[in-house]
Amino acid sequence: MARGLLRHAVPILFAGLCLFGIIVAKITPPFLMSEMLVRMSRNSVLVLSLLIPILAGLGLNFGIVIGAMAGQIGAILIVHWGIPGIGGFALAWIIATPIAIVLGIATGSLFNRAKGREMVSGLIAGFFANGLYQLLFLFAVGSIIPFHSASMILPQGYGLRNTVDLNTIQYAIDGLIPLRFQMQGVEIRVPLVSYVIIVGFCLVTLWFFRTRLGQQFRAMGQDPHVAAIAGIAVERNRIVATVLSTVLAAWGQLLFLQNIGTLNTYSSHEQVGMFAIAALLVSGATVSRATVGQALLGTVLFHTLFVVSPLAGKALAGDAQIGEYFRVFVAYAVITVALVLHAWQSTRAAHEARKATR
Amino acid sequence: MAKPGIRLPGFLREFGIPRLLIAVFLVVLFAVAVATHMDLRGLISDSIVRVGRNGILVLALLPAIQGGIGLNFGLPLGIICGLVGAVISLNAGVHGIAGVGMAAGIGVALAIPVGAGYGWLLNRTRGQEMMVGTYLGFAIVSMMSVFWLLAPFKNPTLVWAIGGRGLRTTLSLGGIYDKVLDRWLTFTVSGVRIPGGTLFVFGALCFLVWLFFRTRMGITIAAARSSTRFARAAGISDERTRVQATVLSTVLAAIGIVVFSQSYGFVQLYTAPLLMAFPAIACILIGGASVTRATIGHVLVGTFLFQSILTVALPVTSQVIQGDISETARLIIQNGMILYALTRIGRT
């Protein structure tokens, strides 16, 4: 019992924190429910995209930011071509896929050159890619690359504006089968098709874990040396895992954007990695072990806190800003604690192993 | 790194392709500046001011590398200590050099226990120091954001005018100790103004760190890093030396941010320190340091190269194109350099 509690300490603590916030801010169930339904549909796929690299022993893929950029390239192009609705959204997915594959191969090769430092490399690679992304959309588009749509380009004649209006594809998936109901006088919309897609990705991920490749990934995650001796192409598989994660992140980001309806050209992607990773970790997942259930639970808990904390900050201290800083702190702190625990356990394991051989 | 088949001359290989590209880029920038008849003296002067401003933060990375911790992405921990010192000195209303001294003094006093705790944690998370440092820094910076809002400072020049509480995001140092070190000992060489005081402090600290690594303690720290087993046989615990190195790094970061702030003219709170470690790390790497070895020379060369690029890129490129490409260039150069270094660990 006590052991079980300890193992689930992180999600329990988090649920307690959320509950405390809900009570002090006097948040009503319909409000929370409508917010959560939307936020779950936005973020789940991005969190799911983290699972495969964890299975393969790459740790938390901070490089999903790069996948999100690929998704945004797709979104920008379909707005440029003026293709609306579900067709436009589908085309954005199709465009984003090969870009994400190429970027995933690049990221995966980088991880192979920086073994044991995949996470920090992924983080920095995200920053680096952000620089290239800026170079592309702030300077190359409209000057070197022909791009004729005055409404998207800055007045100087090149470079994309800070926001791209995605209203042509907004709710393309969410509203495909409109479902809404009343709850205590509040209308709640359910993005039904988005949930179908999310469930689809969950099932595919679960199925993938059971495939031959999935089993190879698991073996690599447990011990890359043994896996290599057993004839598994470790380096190649690590790239495959990164590619899968990057592609899923690109799709997830597009699903996120079609719900939001506007693209902040230069900042929508920046926080993707941090929030997805923090969401996954609050469920009690670790750097080396995470399940589909944890991804979903973590998304619920983390985004509840996200909704609640500014309101709680306002109710407690009369300042919503405190709550906003606090939730950012929680996101970073959760990641820090998970990283510390992971590193602590692996050094201890190495120490024990050394002792055992003596 | 040379591709198989192509052998670069030895000195070039040691210098590294990225460093070569960066040096060439800087030369091109200066060439454009000369060709377009820009105020070259002003550019050089600005570059030197920024070397002095950022130098100590770059120097702060050296003990961590020499101590075997690697790139200290946890630099914001020390920076926060320095900022607390600065805010306390401003709240007390201490002007001039005394104010800078007080800020740095309080910063150092805080940085010693903070650095010791950080070092202790890094000893328990070996192999993941960079990641733990990065996120510990992020977490502390955002925790301190809550603190700045709630801190019991009452000085009306520091807190928001509306509401009367919560520190402002940037605190102006005008009339308090704005550029007090920059102006002290300032002199002009053929039209180029040089902020003597700040450079003197930077130089003095470089010398002290150089000297420190020749004392018994410093040699022990470096020895424990380069040959842990021999050090252990000689009775040196590398756990201790790593903590010492971390404390020194954190202390220098605290001093560094105070010197930075007085030169910049503002104390920046809240999220400002969040990403400060990254440009500093890029500086020392551009100077020729690796994740396992760094010298004072690397600090000096790297700070000069990278800060010059950052200073010169904006005015020069704005002659050619509209818009600020310097921020984009900074992202690419800075993170490209760090990535390059991360992929080079364990190779010669």
Image (cartoon, coloured by chain):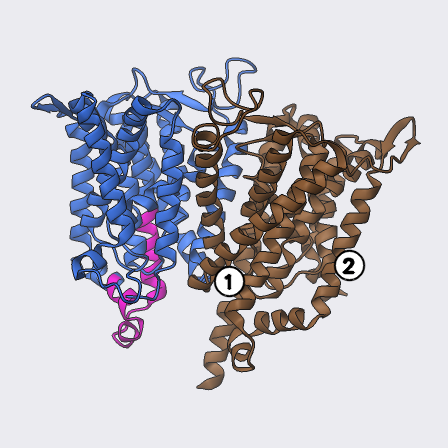
Q: Would residue A154 be seen by someone viewing this image from the given angle?
A: yes
Nearer-the-camera pick, B88 or B169: B169
Location of residue A101 in the rendering, given as x and y in whole percent from the top left corner: 57, 53
Which residue corresponds to mark 1? Answer: A343
Identify the amino acid type marked 2.
Leu
Which residue corresponds to mark 2? Answer: A203
Nearest to N terminus: mark 1 or mark 2: 2
Tell me which residue sits at (49%, 48%) in the image: B135
Identify the magenta region: B222-251
Residue B248 in the magenta stretch? The answer is: yes
Residue at the extreme top: B161
User: Few, some or many C-alpha atoms within 10 Å of disc 1 (few <14, some 14-19, many ≥20)?
Assistant: many
Give the chain ID for the blue colour. Answer: B
The quarter of the rendered structure image containing the C terminus of chain A is bottom left
Q: Find numbered disc 1 in the image and state the secondary structure of the residue it sits on.
A: helix
Q: Colour of chain A?
A: brown
Discs 1, 2 touching: Cβ within 8 Å: no
The quarter of the rendered structure image containing the N terminus of chain A is bottom right
In this rendering, would B211 be left or right of A252?
Answer: left
Q: Nearer the viewer, mark 1 or mark 2?
A: 2
Q: Find numbered disc 2 in the image and state the secondary structure of the residue it sits on.
A: helix
